[in-house]
Image (cartoon, grey):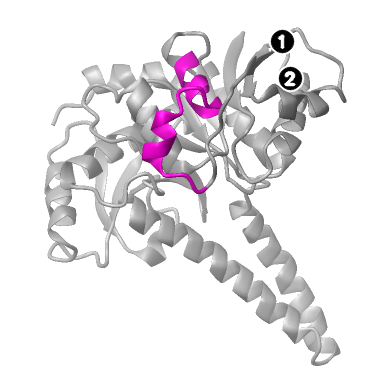
C-alpha cells in the first residue's frame, strides 16, 4: 500500500483537474491511497460526480496558495492545502505529496516543513528531458536562481542517485552545463564545482557540456543552477513551437511544400510531446526529507495524473530512503 497527499487547490485549474486525475489514479493503481486536501465547498461538486472510494480521504483546508503568491506569504498560511499536504509527510501519514501550485511557495514550504537531508543545503527541482539515447535527468530547473559550487556538487550527487534508482544506470555520466568545454570557461562557481566534482569518489563525472550537448545523450545527469536550467528548458519548448509554426506556414506555398511540411510537422509534434506537460509531467524536488512532486501549473487531467503516478512510483521505489543511504555511505567528498 502506498499513501500520498494531493494538493487539490494548486495550479491554474484546481479541483476541476486535480479531482478527476485523483479518481482515475485510484482506479489505475489498486494499492494507492490518497489524502486529498482542499476547500470542501469547492471539492464536493466534483467529488459528487463519481462513486466514493474507501481509498480516498478528503481533508478540509481553510486556505490555499495562489499562483502568484510570494513564498513568505505562503509560509504564513498554515492551513493551506499545500501546507497540510507537507505536514502529512512530516507526521508520517503519507509517503509523498504532489502539487501543481506555485513553485517558489512549494520549495519554500517544503524546505521549512520537511527540512533538507543531511548533507544537502538546498533542494533542487529535477526532471527527465528527452535525448538521442532516451532521456537525461536535468537539475536544477527552477528551485534556486543562484547556486554556489557546493550546491552544484550536491545536485550532482542527488541526480546521480536518481538515475541509478529510477533508470537502473550503474554508473551515470554526470556533467556540468557550461558555456564551453575548456577548463577555463565559466564563472568562478562553475569552475570551483568542476574541481570539487573531480575529487568525488564513486561519481562518474565527465566534465562540462554545452547547451548543444543537452539532447545528445552524452550525459545521464546534467547539472546547472535553477536560472540556467529553467531558461534552457523553456527555450527548447519555445524553439519547437516556433519550428512547428514555420512549417505550418509552408503548407500554403504549393503541393510539394504541403507534403514535406506535413511529414516534418508530424516529427516535430512528436518531439514537442516530449516536453508537453500533458505527456511528461512531474518534476521531483530533491533534497528534502520527503517525496515532493511539482506538477506543471497548466496541467490538465492527463498531466496531473502523470504527476500522481510519478509520486506513487517514487514512494513505491523508496527513492528517499535510497538517496539517504547513499549519501551516508557511498559518497565521500
Q: Dot 1: what SS? A: loop
Q: Which residue is mark 2?
A: 26
Residue 134 visible in the current orientation = no
Q: Nearer the viewer, residue 165 or 238?
A: 238
Residue shown at 74% from the left, 85% from the top: 250
- Answer with left or right where residue 25 lies relative to residue 140: right
Q: Which residue is mark 1?
A: 55
How far from the left and from the top, in percent, is residue 150?
17, 41
Q: As displayed, is residue 86 above or below residue 276?
A: above
Residue shown at 12% from the left, 48% from the top: 195
Q: Contact (CB < 8 A) between labels 1 and 2? A: yes
Work out which quarter of the rendered image holds the N terminus and state it: top right
Extent of the magenta region: 68-88
Q: As displayed, is residue 282 above or below residue 3?
A: below
Few, some or many C-alpha atoms within 10 Å of disc 1 (few <14, some 14-19, many ≥20)? some
Residue 119 visible in the current orientation = yes
Few, some or many C-alpha atoms within 10 Å of disc 2 (few <14, some 14-19, many ≥20)? some
Work out which quarter of the rendered image holds the C terminus and state it: top left
- Answer with left or right where residue 288 lies relative to residue 186: right
Q: CA distance from mark 1 to mark 2?
A: 7 Å
How far from the left and from the top, in percent, is residue 314?
51, 24
Q: Nearer the viewer, residue 136 or 284?
A: 284
Amino acid at each position: 500500500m502506498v499513501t500520498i497527499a494531493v494538493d487539490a487547490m494548486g495550479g491554474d485549474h484546481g479541483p476541476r483537474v486535480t479531482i478527476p486525475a485523483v479518481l482515475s489514479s485510484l482506479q489505475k493503481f489498486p494499492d494507492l491511497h490518497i489524502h486529498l486536501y482542499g476547500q470542501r465547498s469547492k471539492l464536493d461538486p466534483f467529488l459528487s460526480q463519481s462513486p466514493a472510494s474507501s481509498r480516498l480521504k478528503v481533508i478540509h483546508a481553510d486556505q490555499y496558495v495562489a499562483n502568484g503568491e510570494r513564498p513568505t506569504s505562503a509560509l504564513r498560511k498554515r492551513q493551506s492545502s499545500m501546507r497540510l499536504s507537507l505536514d502529512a509527510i512530516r507526521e508520517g501519514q503519507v509517503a509523498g505529496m504532489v502539487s501543481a501550485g506555485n513553485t517558489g511557495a512549494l520549495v519554500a514550504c517544503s524546505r521549512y516543513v520537511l527540512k533538507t537531508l543531511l548533507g544537502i543545503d538546498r533542494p533542487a527541482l529535477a526532471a527527465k528531458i528527452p535525448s538521442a539515447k532516451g532521456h537525461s535527468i536535468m537539475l536544477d530547473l527552477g528551485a534556486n536562481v543562484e547556486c554556489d559550487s557546493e550546491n552544484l556538487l550536491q545536485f550532482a550527487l542527488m541526480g546521480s542517485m536518481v538515475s541509478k534508482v529510477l533508470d537502473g544506470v550503474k554508473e551515470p555520466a554526470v556533467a556540468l552545463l557550461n558555456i564551453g568545454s575548456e577548463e577555463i570557461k565559466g564563472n568562478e562557481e562553475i569552475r570551483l564545482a568542476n574541481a570539487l566534482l573531480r575529487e568525488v569518489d564513486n561519481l562518474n563525472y565527465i566534465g562540462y557540456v554545452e547547451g548543444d550537448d543537452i539532447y545528445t545523450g552524452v550525459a545521464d545527469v546534467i547539472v546547472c543552477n535553477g536560472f540556467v536550467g529553467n531558461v534552457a528548458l523553456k527555450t527548447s519548448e519555445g524553439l519547437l513551437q516556433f519550428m512547428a509554426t514555420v512549417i505550418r506556414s509552408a503548407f500554403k506555398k504549393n503541393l510539394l511544400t504541403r507534403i514535406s511540411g506535413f511529414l516534418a510537422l508530424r516529427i516535430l509534434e512528436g518531439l514537442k510531446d516530449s516536453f508537453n506537460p500533458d505527456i511528461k509531467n512531474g518534476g521531483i524536488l530533491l533534497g528534502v526529507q520527503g517525496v515532493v512532486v511539482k506538477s506543471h501549473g497548466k496541467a490538465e487531467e492527463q498531466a496531473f495524473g502523470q504527476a500522481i503516478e510519478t509520486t506513487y512510483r517514487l514512494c513505491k521505489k523508496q527513492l528517499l530512503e535510497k538517496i539517504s543511504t547513499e549519501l551516508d555511505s557511498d559518497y565521500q567528498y
